[in-house]
Image (tube, helix red, strand yellow):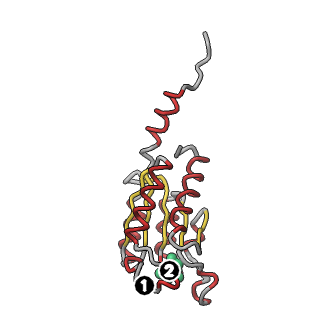
Amino acid sequence: MTSPKATAADVTSDVTISARTRILCISGPNLQLLGAREPEVYGRATLADIHARLAARAQALGVDVDARQSNHEGTLVDWIGDAPRENAAGILINPGAYTHTSIAILDAVRAVGLPCVEVHLSNPDAREPFRRRSYIAKACVARVAGFGADSYELGLDGLVRVLARRAIAP
Ligand code: DQA
């Protein structure tokens, strides 16, 4: 009997299955104001622009991204806690100012155990000293910061590589 070899059709069907890989993208407080908010720090792209670019990148990578924003810590905690039940394979998160204050968000990411990448438009380490502490970093596999709106796409690329290594994504 000949040993089965991967064909183009097999590869295509693998990609089709993996295309269902879901990634939850969460943005925290004040990020709904992007575009108008301190453009010299955060750039001119709106959150809608960022979500559209993420969706395009996700399509190219063969994954789905569910992108949301809330100003409320408890809502962010709820979304993280619900992520496994909603079949998310990983989390991309910009917690905004909660990065520097929220043990609840750190605990939520630890509790669900999904791979999580922290993203920031600015580079918090190069700003005020109070931005140097990141609670969520302790639960993240990686951080992308300082690339403006590109940080989200770069974070998605990195997260998909992490998932691929764990054989969850294409
Ligand atoms: C931010 C950096 C945080 O320090 C700040 O509070 C934000 C945005 C960023 O994306 O650069 O709200 O997370």
Q: Given the current orientation, which residue lies at the most extreme right position?
A: 126
**Could you say which disc has been placed on residue 37 in the image?**
1
**Could you say which disc has been placed on residue 136 in the image?**
none
Residue drawn 35% across the image and 72% down it: 75
Which residue in the protein does label 2 denote? 42
Q: Position of residue 78 (x, y in %)?
A: 37, 67
Using a 10 Å C-alpha cutoff, classify the residue at mark 2 as few (fewer than 14 neighbours), some (14 to 19) or many (20 or more): many
Q: Position of residue 155 (x, y in %)?
A: 55, 62
Q: Given the current orientation, which residue lies at the most extreme top position?
A: 1
Task: Please tell me which of labels 1 and 2 falls first in the chain.
Answer: 1
Q: Quadrant of the N terminus?
A: top right
Residue 9 visible in this rendered orientation of the protein: yes
- Separation of marks 1 and 2 at Cα, in angstroms: 7 Å
Q: Position of residue 92 (x, y in %)?
A: 49, 63
Mark 1 touching mark 2, by CB under 8 A?
yes
The front one of 160 and 98 is 160
Looking at mark 1, is its residue's CB closer than 8 Å to ligand 1? Answer: no
Residue drawn 58% across the image and 19% down it: 4
Looking at mark 2, is its residue's CB closer than 8 Å to ligand 1? Answer: yes
Residue drawn 57% across the image and 26% down it: 6
Q: Position of residue 81 (x, y in %)?
A: 41, 63
- 31, above or below 63, in the image: below
The three-letter code of the residue at mark 2 reads Tyr
Residue 99 visible in this rendered orientation of the protein: no
Element under disc 1: loop
- How many labels, in total? 2
The three-letter code of the residue at mark 1 reads Arg
The front one of 99 and 56 is 56
